[in-house]
Image (cartoon, rainbow, N blue to C red):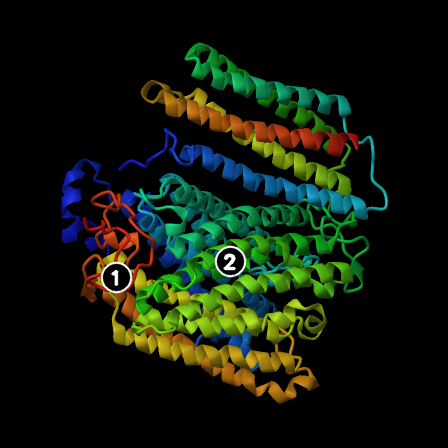
Amino acid sequence: MNIPYTVEERPDTGLANGKLGIWLFLASEVMLFGALFSTYIILRVGATEWPHGELNIPLGAINTVILISSSVTMVMAWASLKMNEWGKHRLYLLATFVLAAVFLVNKYFEYSAHFATGEGPWHSTFLAIYFTMTGLHGLHILGGMIVMAYFLGPGAKLWKTNPDQFANRIEYTGLYWHFVDLVWIFLFPVLYLL
Amino acid sequence: MDKSATHHPTVAHPHVEHAHEELGFWRTYVFSVDHKWIGIQYAVTGLLFLLFGFTLMMLMRWQLAYPGRPIPLIGGLFGQDKAPGGIMLPEFYNQLGAMHGTIMVFMGVVPLAVGGFGNFVLPLQIGAPDMAFPKINMMSYWAYFLGGVTMLASFFMPGGAAQSGWTSYPPLSVINQGQQTMWLIGMMFLITSSLLGSLNFITTTVQLRAKGLSWMRLPFFVWAQFVTSFLLLLAFPPLEAAGILQLMDKVAGTSFFMPSGLVVSNRIVTSMTGIAQGSVASGGGNPLLWQHLFWFLAHPEVYVLILPAMGIVSEIIANNTRKPLWGYRALVYSLVFLGFMSFIVWAHHMFMTGMGTTMSAFFQTTTMIISIPSVVILTALLMSLVGASIRFTTPMLFALAFLPMFGIGGLTGLPLGLAPSDIHLHDTYYVIGHFHYVVAPGTIFALFGGVYYWFPKATGRKMNDLLGQLHFWGSLVAINLVFFPMFIEGLAGMNRRMYDGGAQFAHTKSVLYWNVVQGYAAWALGLFQLFFIVNFFMSIKWGKAVDRNPWEATTLEWAAPSPPPHGNFLTEPIAYRAPYEYSVPGAAKDFTPQFEPERA
């Protein structure tokens, strides 16, 4: 039994199943982070004072650059597939994976600096929302890395048997990855700068 | 059902054809990716949770009817920390209350209505071979299963299950002794499950409709599931966010929902966590924030409970009145509008929180607006009955009872949606009566109707009619005796969530005897469910064998064999017409199925 439109597009909707599925997933993710951003606003509006300068802005800025770069390499990984250049695809996907890992290493240094002074999420409402939002975002980075590792490893076999489907999967991974990026682009100014 | 699913004569042909696809026991019955089997897994698990949640309520009803008297027969089973000497402790009563609500809503009704009926019926009704993402579908069921196990396990852990109501309002939920953490983890699993399910339903409906099945030819049931899926997809994530925040409050010592300087039992509340044990909670949190995030889910959730039920009832009514549904387009537009509006009415649960009159005015206005499409739907279904020669089959009885029961539930909601009258009724048994009329004799009756209606499709056999009638009439009388007195109690001012059923208040003295009546009615209701249970299992084996279209229905699922094989249809189904072409003038028979080609 075959499910129709797993690879090819349905003519009247112009969509393959996976494309619609990933967009719906991202819609629900928007609601998840939307609720957290709303929480941030409500807590901050209700606070008598709000701390500034507690976070490492240069490190945060570097991480922003890293994630934006990783979005570019992610697009290139997909475009290389479309141009049928397998070697380049591997290189770009690996680069995305490494950039994501560097992001998390930087995050580890930021976190450990806070914990070293005993100022964890319990310390203040600001740090509570900081750790919750960046922590959840970090988990999303980790999830993306697991998916990329899969397509660098065992998942890559699909390219031989069904290149179109493989290219689609990389495209969906990319859509997710851009979303994770976008969340950070909101998180950085909201938490570090404002 | 197991045997007939693979060896039913009508399945013999494709079975041989796909012999190379033969799956082992585990892949067929446990980790199945077949939407029909997943639907059955969902439905059976959901029915078991409904029974379990109902059992909790029967225990509570004993305590309400006879406060402080030992529970007969089984009182000794609960142990010293829950019911010493068989007498229920207040903490145990609170656990039962919180878990009754949680189980009924998140693990009983929704999994049965959406996971069960949606999974089984929706792909068949749109003529699809399966769901768009069969593996994700399987993961959805197992996430639900794990959530259920987590919730059940919490009863046996130190401190017992969560005790702060199904709404889990902080600060109480954060500082109480029950396993609130387990409740939150369980909810994470359930939310994941419904996310995976809903994106699958939407994709399937958009992408896998059969040839000729345009949007306005979709059966109303499909529309109902489609709109429901959007509610699940978009309303659950804020509760997930809220759950994460409350989990942080529980385990990481944050104060998202904990106000500054909170004093409980003459002591300033300290941080809950082991990391900073003993230090004063940092405070600055906002308990109302939880309520906003919670009801942002939980009001759409009400429509998640009711819309699939409306879908089921519409199918049964069209089939048993032998008429097209009255005002199909109005039904669809009302449904979509209802789904949209359900996102902007949530704070009518919060009139008493002091959030301000501007907010109250806004939310009571939207609440009055949302009642309009509900009334349109109910009216259209009532109008469908006019002039029909109704077949009073068992599913039809349940569908007919749904209309007035949901009507009572809906109309009694209006005084709650208006801030001034809500002040008097808030947190009384009136509220309990209101939403139970919507969900119990409303939705659950519709779900029973659905079980009787689609049982032949799932098993190839009909359920017994006599047992079905006994189940229906007994349940109808008993359930009304449970819930109608709640309006009387509530108007008299009896508060909900009272461990002693309100006996400590002078002003409820005159209505206390209803608690005894309700107790007997609840236990009778339990007895009448035995007819259903016996009927269900007996009919799997000995029910009257039927062909593919026993109800002479028109929608696409009846084109598939009963039970349908893996992949569903033997030939590609094509929809030639609207879904409810009953009693077409000039036609040879009183139903013209969607899948029947035009005669040349």
In the rendered structure, the answer to whether residue A46 lies left or right of residue B296 reads: right
**Residue located 76% across and 56% down the image:** B269
Q: Nearer the viewer, residue B103 or B455?
A: B455
Q: Can the viewer see residue B275 in this picture?
A: no
Q: Say whether marks 1 and 2 touch (CB < 8 Å).
A: no
Amino acid carrying label 2: it is Ser
Viewport quadrant of the N terminus of chain B: bottom left
Spot occupied by residue A171 in the image (x, y as percentages of width and height) = 48, 25
The residue where tag 2 is placed is B334
Instruction: Using the numbered discs, state the Cα–Cα distance from disc 1 to disc 2 in whole angstroms.
Output: 26 Å
User: In screen coordinates, is B524 left or right of B457?
Assistant: right
Secondary-structure class at tag 2: helix
Q: Estimate how packed mark 1 is, as few (under 14), some (14 to 19) or many (20 or more) residues with alpha carbons within 10 Å.
A: some
Which residue position holds label 1? B591
Q: Amino acid at mark 1?
A: Phe
Percent x, y of residue B63: 55, 78
Q: Residue at x 31, y 42 (%)?
A: B211
- Nearer-N-terminus badge (1/2): 2
Nearest to the observer: residue B75 or residue B492: B492
> What residue is shown at x 74% (from left), y 43% (from top)?
A41
Q: Are marks 1 and 2 on the same chain?
A: yes
Is A152 situated left or right of B291 in this image? Answer: left
Q: Position of residue B177 (x, y in %)?
A: 64, 59
**Quarter of the view holding residue A169:** top left
Q: Label 1's element?
A: loop
x and y percentages locating residue B185 in the rendered image: 55, 49
- Kindly give the residue lying farthest to the right in the view shown: A48
Name the side, left or right, on which B219 lies relative to A189.
left
Chain letter of mark 1 equals: B
